[in-house]
Structures are given as structure tokens and as C-alpha cells.
Image (spheres, rainbow, N blue to C red):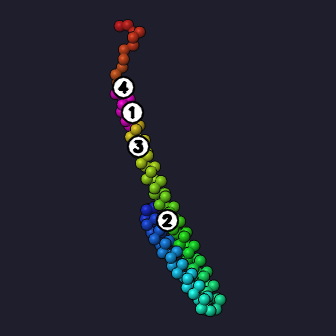
Amino acid sequence: MSTRTKWMILAPLGLLLFSFGLTVLSEAAHQRRIGEPTQVWVVLGLYSLALINGGLIMFGEALRFRILLDVRRETRRSMRQLLRKVNLKAASGKHKSSKKAKSPTKTD
């Protein structure tokens, strides 16, 4: 799977998972407020914690892939520019070296 595809999948899924975790957290708080047994809202709270952290981890991985894409793009761009400069210097060097000047000290 390409880096771009990984980024396109992980970013929305991470945000979705994070948002769902916040929703479950608010439900756990609601269960606590209405007086449900401790076991119910604690389990919901732990579940929400796992969802929130999982979403953040997935989104962090997506950011890593996006940064990798940007770094690769910039590296390729700078390599192309450097290659153009080298080719231009090589082309101009060939024209200068093809014309040999006579040595002023040599006699025919």
C-alpha cells in the first residue's frame, strides 16, 4: 500500500475513532450522573479512553505519512534542480573545452 493511501485511510479513521471515544466518554459521564452502578460507567470510561488513544495514535501515524510524503516531494524537487544545474554546467563546459587556444610559447 502506498504512503499516500495509508495517509488517506488513517487520517479520517483516526479522527472518527477519536470523536467516537469522546462520545462514549460523555455517555460514561452521563451514566455516572444518573447514578448507574460504578462498574457500568467505569467500563464505559475505560472503553472511551482506549478509543480516544487509538484515534490519536492513528491520526499521529497519518501525520507521519503526510510528512514523509512532503519530505519526499521536496527531496525530489531539489534533486531535479541540482541535476539541471549540473547538466547546464556540463553542457557549457563542453563548449568551452572544445576550443583549444594556441600556446603563446609554442613555435611551429
Quick one: label 3, few (<14), some, or many (20+) residues within 10 Å?
few
Looking at the rendered structure, the kind of residue marked 1 is: Ala
- The residue pinned by badge 4 equals 96
Position in image of residue 69 (x %, y %):
45, 57
Q: Tell me how far mark 1 sits from mark 4, CA to CA.
A: 10 Å
Vertical position of residue 53 compared to residue 63: above or below: below
Q: Is residue 78 visible?
A: yes
Q: Tell me how far mark 2 sits from mark 1, CA to CA.
A: 42 Å
Instruction: Label 1: state its secondary structure.
Output: helix
Q: Tell me how far mark 3 sits from mark 2, CA to CA.
A: 29 Å
Instruction: Label 3: state its secondary structure.
Output: helix
Of label 4 and label 2, which has the lower sequence position? 2
Looking at the rendered structure, the kind of residue marked 3 is: Gln
Q: Please provide the residue range marked out in magenta.
A: 87-95
Write the residue at 59% across / 77% down. Answer: 49
Of label 3 and label 2, which has the lower sequence position? 2
Looking at the rendered structure, the kind of residue marked 4 is: Lys
Quick one: label 2, few (<14), some, or many (20+) residues within 10 Å?
many
Quick one: label 4, few (<14), some, or many (20+) residues within 10 Å?
few
Of label 2 and label 1, which has the lower sequence position? 2
Instruction: Please state if 2 lies on the left or on the right of 95 as rendered.
Output: right
- The residue pinned by badge 3 equals 81
